[in-house]
């Protein structure tokens, strides 16, 4: 599944916090951290850098640098950005293949 969405489609699809959470989760599941970061940048720009900067306590310049392609932001920065969007991390167990009971 490709997540190559135009801006108009993003506004139509992401109308709630739940929509944004599902979008980011799907991005990570389908494309890993690189696609997740690309999608997070789209969302932050859509909401507005100034708004996210104010809510997160991060400077706009710091946000731009953090969301630049190829960057690997610190965990604390990601927590602040997600929190400013009304989101949080959730840790869950990966789906596992059946384990051979004879092992």
Image (spheres, rainbow, N blue to C red):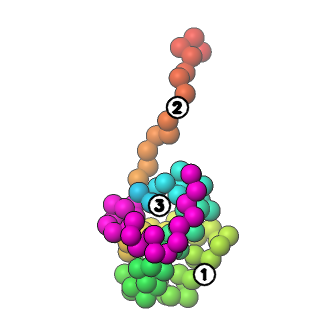
- At a point 53% along the width and 23% down the height, the residue shown is 98
Q: Which mark is residue 43?
A: none
Q: Earlier in the sequence, mark 1 or mark 3?
A: 3
Which label sits in the foreground, 3 or 2?
A: 3
> Does dot 2 land on a helix, a strand or a loop?
loop
Q: Which mark is residue 96?
A: 2
Q: Earlier in the sequence, mark 2 or mark 1?
A: 1
Q: Seen from this angle, which residue lies furthest top? A: 102
- At a point 43% along the width and 84% down the height, the residue shown is 48
The quadrant where residue 37 appears: bottom right
Real-space CA distance between mark 2 and mark 1, rounded to the nearest whole angstrom? 36 Å
Residue situated in front as seen by the camera: 83 or 69: 69
- Tell me residue 29's x, y (percent): 53, 50
Q: Which residues are magenta?
A: 1-21
- Tell me residue 61's x, y (percent): 55, 88
Q: Which mark is residue 24?
A: 3
- Disc 3 and disc 2 in contact, CB within 8 angstroms: no
**Residue 39 appears in the figure:** yes
- At a point 41% along the width and 57% down the height, the residue shown is 22
Query: Is 19 inside the magenta-drawn segment?
Result: yes
- Tell me residue 96's x, y (percent): 52, 31
Q: Which residue is mark 1?
A: 65
Real-space CA distance between mark 3 and mark 2, rounded to the nearest whole angstrom? 22 Å
Q: Is residue 97 left or right of residue 55?
A: right
Which label sits in the foreground, 1 or 3?
A: 3
Mark 2 crowd level (few <14, some 14–19, many ≥20, 10 Å Cα): few
- Tell me residue 92's x, y (percent): 43, 44
């Amino acid at each position: 599944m490709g997540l190559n969405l135009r801006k108009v489609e993003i506004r139509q699809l992401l109308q709630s916090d739940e929509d944004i959470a599902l979008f980011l989760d799907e991005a990570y599941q389908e494309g890993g951290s690189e696609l997740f970061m690309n999608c997070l940048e789209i969302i932050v720009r859509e909401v507005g850098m100034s708004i996210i900067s104010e809510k997160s306590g991060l400077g706009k310049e710091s946000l731009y640098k953090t969301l630049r392609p190829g960057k690997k932001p610190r965990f604390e920065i990601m927590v602040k950005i997600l929190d400013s969007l009304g989101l949080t991390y959730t840790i869950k167990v990966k789906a596992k293949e059946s384990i051979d009971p004879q092992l």
